[in-house]
């Protein structure tokens, strides 16, 4: 299989990456980036040896650095390319790259046309020192845009490693856009691991009562109708929202603290959220078929 892959700078850089999971959604506001972050954390945590990378190609709205508590970290250049930022310090089992690391100020806007976006994505894939990874999770912008086409074009030589996860909410408008996302994966022959229904109900932290704020069950019905694996539903989790929003504060208040304890601390705190055990079941459904292919 490997001998049939056309050699390109991207394929050479990613030759030691076993699986590439592209997280996509038909529309914005469905929690795609939080799902990508949880996927990367949970894949790392599912095995004591798993090494995971997360690439943020949502170029105009990079949020992964903040969610991992990495805002303000610089990107270093080595003789072998850009060094990704490690969320778990000395353990070096969870690394990240995002345009957010390249902005002078985190509030600066990214006003780029298609060719510059394409060049940035190519650099992220071919110039970053990803090394040996079990999984590379790629957080994409909402919809199906230039970034998606550029990404798949550059990843064509390693197409056999690619798969996708679609994120939606139960709302009818989100499901309609998720169908467009599914249509895109089919048109580009991108295998879909399954569908996640996010924001499926709200669990009151005081009494435990579940309110279906955005309806519920629509994602599962869509998966069944379209022959997709339904990976699971995730309720609105206020503890998770607080954790990911506060990640930046944790980083800034821990200046001078050992990086390895900081990164591990994020994982420890995540495991205490109500969503964590639900997501571990989702990861199990994702890993089983991928391991079977390996």
Image: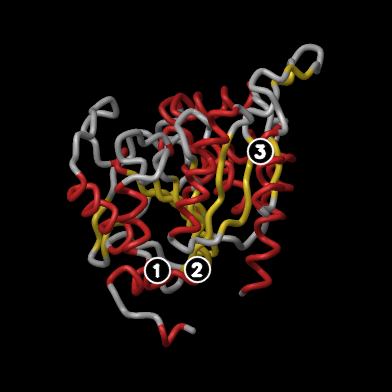
**In the depicted view, which residue is nearer to us: 291 or 23?**
23
Q: CA distance from mark 3 to mark 1?
A: 33 Å
Would you say residue 208 is visible in this rendering?
yes
Q: Quadrant of the C terminus?
A: bottom right
| Residue 152 falls left or right of residue 176 | left
Label 3 or label 1, whichever lies nearer to me, is 3
For disc 2, the neighbor class at 10 Å (few under 14, some 14 to 19, many from 20) is: many
For disc 1, the neighbor class at 10 Å (few under 14, some 14 to 19, many from 20) is: many
Q: Which mark is residue 219?
A: 3
Q: Residue at x 52, y 65 (%)?
A: 19
Q: Which residue is mark 1?
A: 14
| Residue 78 falls left or right of residue 280 | left
Would you say residue 92 is visible in this rendering?
no
**Residue 18 placement (x, y as % from top left):** 52, 69
**Residue 210 placement (x, y as % from top left):** 77, 19
Q: Are marks 2 and 1 in contact (CB under 8 Å)?
A: yes
Give the quarter of the image for residue 61: top left
Q: Residue at x 30, y 35 (%)?
A: 60
Q: CA distance from mark 3 to mark 2?
A: 26 Å
| N-term-proximal mark, 3 vs 2 | 2
Q: Are marks 3 and 2 in contact (CB under 8 Å)?
A: no
Q: Element under label 2?
A: helix
Q: Which mark is residue 161?
A: 2
């Amino acid at each position: 299989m490997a001998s049939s892959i056309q050699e390109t700078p991207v394929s050479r850089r990613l030759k030691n990456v076993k699986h590439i999971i592209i997280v996509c959604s038909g529309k914005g506001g469905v929690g795609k980036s939080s799902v990508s972050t949880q996927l990367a954390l949970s894949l790392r945590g599912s095995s004591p040896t798993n090494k995971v990378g997360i690439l943020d190609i949502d170029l105009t709205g990079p949020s992964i650095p903040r969610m991992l508590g990495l805002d303000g970290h610089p990107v270093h250049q080595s003789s072998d390319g850009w060094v990704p930022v490690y969320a778990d310090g000395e353990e070096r089992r969870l690394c990240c790259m995002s345009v957010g690391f390249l902005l002078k100020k985190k509030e600066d806007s990214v006003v780029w046309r298609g060719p510059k976006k394409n060049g940035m994505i190519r650099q992220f894939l071919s110039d970053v020192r990803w090394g040996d990874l079990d999984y590379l999770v790629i957080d994409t912008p909402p919809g199906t845009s230039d970034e998606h086409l550029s990404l798949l074009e550059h990843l064509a030589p390693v197409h056999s490693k690619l798969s996708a996860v679609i994120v939606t909410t139960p709302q009818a408008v989100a499901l309609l856009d998720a169908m467009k996302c599914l249509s895109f994966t089919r048109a580009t022959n991108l295998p879909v691991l399954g569908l996640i229904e996010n924001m499926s109900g709200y669990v009151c932290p005081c009494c435990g009562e579940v309110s279906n704020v955005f309806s519920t069950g629509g994602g599962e019905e869509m998966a069944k109708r379209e022959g997709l694996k339904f990976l699971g539903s995730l309720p609105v989790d206020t503890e998770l929202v607080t954790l990911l929003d506060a990640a930046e504060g944790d980083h800034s208040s821990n200046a001078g603290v050992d990086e390895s304890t900081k990164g591990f601390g994020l994982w420890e705190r995540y495991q205490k959220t109500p969503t964590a055990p639900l997501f571990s079941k989702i990861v199990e459904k994702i890993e089983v078929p991928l391991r079977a292919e390996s």
